[in-house]
Amino acid sequence: MEQDDRRQPITGDLAADLPATSGRNPALDGVRVLAALAVLLTHVGGQTGFEFTGTPASWVVSRGDVGVPIFFVLSGLLLYRPWARAALTGGRRPAAGPYFVRRALRILPAYWTVVIVALCTLNAPHVSSAATWLQYLLLVQNYNLHPWWYGTGADGLAQMWSLVVEVSFYLVLPVLAAALAWWASRATGGPAGTSEVSRRAWRLLAGIGVIGLSSYGVAVLAFYPSLQLWLGETLLRLMTWFAGGMLLAVMSEWAHADSSRADSSHPDTAGAGPAARFCRTVAGSAEACWLIAAIAFVIACTPLAGPETLAIPTLWNTELKTALYTVIGTALVAPVAFQSGRPTWMTRALGNRVMSFLGRISYGIFLWQFVVIYAFFAVVHARDAFQGTLYGWPAVLGILAAVTVATVAMAAISYYLLERPVQRLYRPRRSRSRRDRSRRGPSRRDRSQRAPARHAATGARTRPAGLAPPLPQRR
């Protein structure tokens, strides 16, 4: 029997398999938890001296900083997604004002609390310095070319360098998104049959790719003509990690935009576009994606990606490590980001109640871990690696367990007593009006709109209400 090579009708299941782009993705909470615990692991390893021992296990521990690019990929994905949707469809972009308010309430109160605690308890000789307070409260300490602290920050605040980079991304995102939207809107030409959405998507992907690649050029400036290590802790140098998440955002929104267009013209092909097929393939190939991430991580755990100690890496070490971490973060997040709303083994493993809880408090885990580490060594009257004491793996495991429990406890307290109440202070006007209407019950207008559907269900003839056509709903 000769095979029919014509396109077969597409079932509605394909549209249902599109990436979930609205609401909270519980599985991404699990990824966020893994990133937070990886950062905690490397900080405990450094404070105990275990990651400087030259063993295969110590190399793995020293590369726990891979949690940082995972955080950045998640931020690029989740924050850029509404702007990507607007750029592809020509819709209204998110308002910058509410966006900045939400970000500030999410980040600053808990961060400022940790800064106050750390400076007053762990950096007492500098507590009277107004410059120190301003640098840390305003998140500009990365740009201090001659700091009084050693390493990436003051005691208890060494991890905050990455928060400076994160906040820098928050600040430039509206402008960056507007520039990318302008660039995408200039799309013309292309192969016959190429939709406007596809032309815009390709230009967005190209623009984000160029932005990501620029990070590798900035890395050269950090080494030549003279060593400028502070550039390594800036958004310009690390934009490639955010770009990975932004690319994922474009692909997921492209899949939905193509599907919406097909729904209105050819319902049988909804969810059959190239972006939708790509997202489905990646979502169904989690094992392959994570194998790629694992191979990249193994390479990163070698001298090719720089020393495991605090020594300064070479330019090529830096470039390779940055590229490997981009691959790891993007390959790890992609199959999770492209999952549909249907329950899968992945959502059960990464989005269960425990992971969901830890994901909600993961920001506090990041913030409080160094304060807890210093407090632990002070309480047990122990010396850390920087005071000349190195610990073997049994002691490291015990310290890691104790510090993890204490950090999770502090993060939970911070979340429920500070972070969540502060975030509830700001509610968009639209959300408040919807909540008020739900409390009052349906209005006369709502009842008049529901009447035709109710009569139609009973077969009764109704008088046209003259209502505007309903807005298209995303499947």
Image (tube, rainbow, N blue to C red):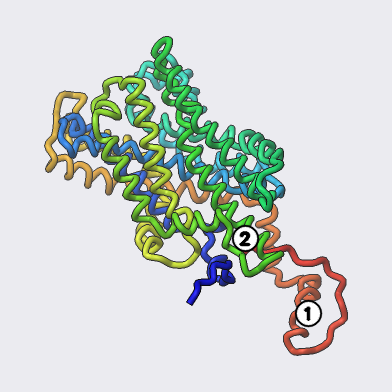
Residue 445, visible in the rendered structure: yes
The spot of residue 387 in percent (x, y) is: 18, 24
Q: Residue at x 42, y 60 (%)?
A: 284
Badge 1 amino acid? Ala
The spot of residue 117 in percent (x, y) is: 38, 33
Badge 2 amino acid? Ser
* Quadrant position of the C terminus in the picture: bottom right
* Element on which disc 2 rests: helix
- Pointer 1: what residue? 451
The spot of residue 224 in percent (x, y) is: 42, 13
The spot of residue 77 in percent (x, y) is: 51, 46
Q: Residue at x 55, y 49 (%)?
A: 251
Q: Nearer the viewer, mark 2 or mark 1?
A: 2
Q: Is residue 14 left or right of residue 163?
A: right
* View extreme (bottom): residue: 459
Crowding at dot 2, Cα within 10 Å, few <14 / some 14-19 / many 20+, comes out as: many
For residue 215, above or below residue 277: above
Crowding at dot 1, Cα within 10 Å, few <14 / some 14-19 / many 20+, comes out as: few
Residue 94, visible in the rendered structure: no
Q: Is residue 112 left or right of residue 94?
A: left
Corner quadrant of residue 379: top left
Observer-nearest residue: 231 or 195? 195
Question: Separation of disc 2 and disc 1 at Cα?
Answer: 30 Å
* Element on which disc 1 rests: helix
Q: Residue at x 44, y 21 (%)?
A: 231
Corner quadrant of residue 26: bottom left
Count of numbered tags: 2
Q: Is residue 135 left or right of residue 345?
A: right
For residue 146, above or below residue 206: above
- Pointer 2: what residue? 259
